[in-house]
Amino acid sequence: MGTNLMVRKNVFSSTLREAMSGSKPEQEEPRADETLSEPPAPPGTSASHQDENPAPASTSGKRSNPNVEIFRKSFQEQMLRTMQDVDPDRVDSSRFQDRLDVAEELDGLKDSIRENGQQVPVLLRRVAGDRFEVVYGRRRILACRQLGIDVRAMVVEISDEDALIAQGLENAARLENSYIEKALFVAQVTDAGYSLATIQKALDIDKTQASKMRGVIRDVPREVIAAIGAAHGAGRRPWEELRNALSGDDAPGQARLLKMIDEGLPSHERLKKLLVLLRQTRRTEHAAPAPDVKIGNGDFKLDRTPRSLTVKAHRNAPEAFLQHLEENLERIYQEWQNDNA
């Protein structure tokens, strides 16, 4: 498995720098030992029998990110110069995951590769020993691994930051990742300490967009996101609606939320139905508030919502009871945990 593994240094990084600066890449003369054949389709372009679904030509009038366009157009020559066949079992995952489920709809991709070959290469960089790390193309690598064949790859030496930018630019060119997958990617990159400028380069988003994405990931539990899935086709608005619905005191807890998600539905329908249920729950609870619970002949009153419990004392109530309650809350909680273990 695998053929001569030659790594071209700096070629790919220079392409990225030119894309970031908006300049036209310089053309390098092919070396004598490099055989040029009919090039495969660069990221984001059309090709017959493609093994990934590229972004279609824009018909909405929205202009493409210039960096993405320069990156895409300069890719073809770089691919010809760094193409190799690599054993997919020697490829490790990248630090930053840009898909919630890499195996989603993998059977169609495997069928395409089996029938027509792998038309679009993946991008790898060499790590320790004879191992490689994927920059992008995780689904193609998984498909080739399951098919028992080598994966066609570009192998380059680039920095961590260049690898991140390349991963983001390729995703932007393909337009396959959903809003929540991009938001998770932004959160991972931010948590790793990369600057906002790097994030903007990689994903073509501004500071406000990045902030909103981080807010969604912060306020919506990861388990809930995983249960909903990628929700392709659902943009920013429904996820922000979910975030807002979960930020109030009357929001259901995580366990209840997970039970509200219908895993029998397609991912985007799960999100849609969950929002409907949350709206219905809010209307019901606001229309019929729970009655107050009185303790000790009305000395104390409990106000209960799904996310809060307030103890209100009458002006003649013994304040010592409130202190006693406060001092024993930890013990009460531990007893509850033991009883429900």
Image (cartoon, helix red, strand yellow):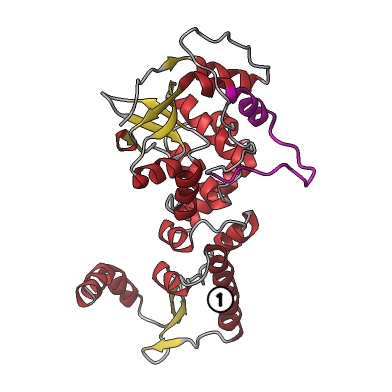
Query: Left or right: where does residue 88 sit relative to residue 71?
Result: left
Of 201 and 251, the residue lying toward us: 201
Q: How many marks?
A: 1
Decide if residue 12 is in sight here: yes
Query: Left or right: where does residue 279 sit relative to residue 114?
Result: right
Q: Which residue is drawn at 47% across and 58% down?
A: 225
Q: Which residue is drawn at 33% across and 33% down?
A: 87
Decide if residue 315 is in sight here: no
- Whether residue 41 is in magenta: the answer is no
Secondary structure beneath dot 1 equals helix
Which image quarter holds the C terminus? bottom left
Spot occupied by residue 108 in the image (x, y as percentages of width and height)? 49, 53
Spot occupied by residue 329 in the image (x, y as percentages of width and height)? 28, 70
Residue 130, quarter of picture: top left
Spot occupied by residue 327 in the image (x, y as percentages of width and height)? 27, 68
Residue 293, quarter of picture: bottom left
Q: What stretch is highlighted in magenta?
A: 52-76
Task: Provide the residue designation for mark 1.
Answer: 277
Residue 89, quarter of picture: top left
